[in-house]
Image (spheres, rainbow, N blue to C red):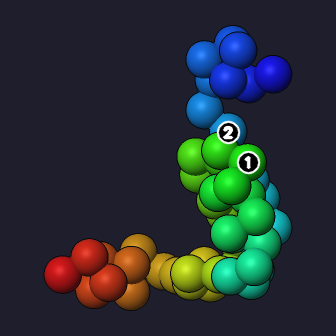
Amino acid sequence: MARSLELKVIAEGVETAEQLEFLQGLGCHFYQRYLHSQPLPVEEFQKLLR
């Protein structure tokens, strides 16, 4: 449905590589949760970007 409406899809609660792979197979565009990182203070996030 999202594709037919040309919408981007965001999945929440992705915590394992298997879940990520499954969602990628469905065409999900963005992911949120602790698979890549837990919430960080701004300073720690900036360190990751360097």
Quadrant containing the C terminus in the rendered view: bottom left
Circle 2 sits in a helix, a strand or a loop, which is it? loop
Q: Say left or right for 45 vs 26.
A: left
Q: Residue at x 73, y 48 (%)?
A: 26
Q: Residues within 10 Å of mark 1 (few under 14, many from 20)?
A: few
Return the mark for residue 26. Answer: 1
Q: Residue furthest top?
A: 5
Q: Is residue 19 above or below residue 50?
A: above
Return the mark for residue 9. Answer: 2
Between 3 and 32, the one nearer to me in the picture:
3
Residue 13 screen position, x and y as percent: 81, 67
Q: Are marks 1 and 2 in contact (CB under 8 Å)?
A: yes
Q: Is residue 11 visible to us here? A: yes
Of the residues tagged 1 and 2, which is closer to the observer?
1
Name which residue type carries label 1: Leu
Q: Residue at x 69, y 55 (%)?
A: 25
Tell me the quarter of the picture where residue 31 sits. bottom right
Determine the CA span between mark 1 and mark 2. Answer: 10 Å
Tell me the quarter of the picture where residue 20 sits. bottom right
Q: Residue at x 60, y 32 (%)?
A: 8
Q: Is residue 43 visible to us here? A: no
Return the mark for residue 10. Answer: none
Q: Is residue 3 above or below residue 21?
A: above
Quadrant containing the N terminus in the rendered view: top right
Number of numbered discs present? 2
Circle 1 sits in a helix, a strand or a loop, which is it? loop
Q: Say left or right for 42 vs 7.
A: left
Name which residue type carries label 2: Val
* Mark 1 or mark 2: whose residue is earlier in sequence: 2
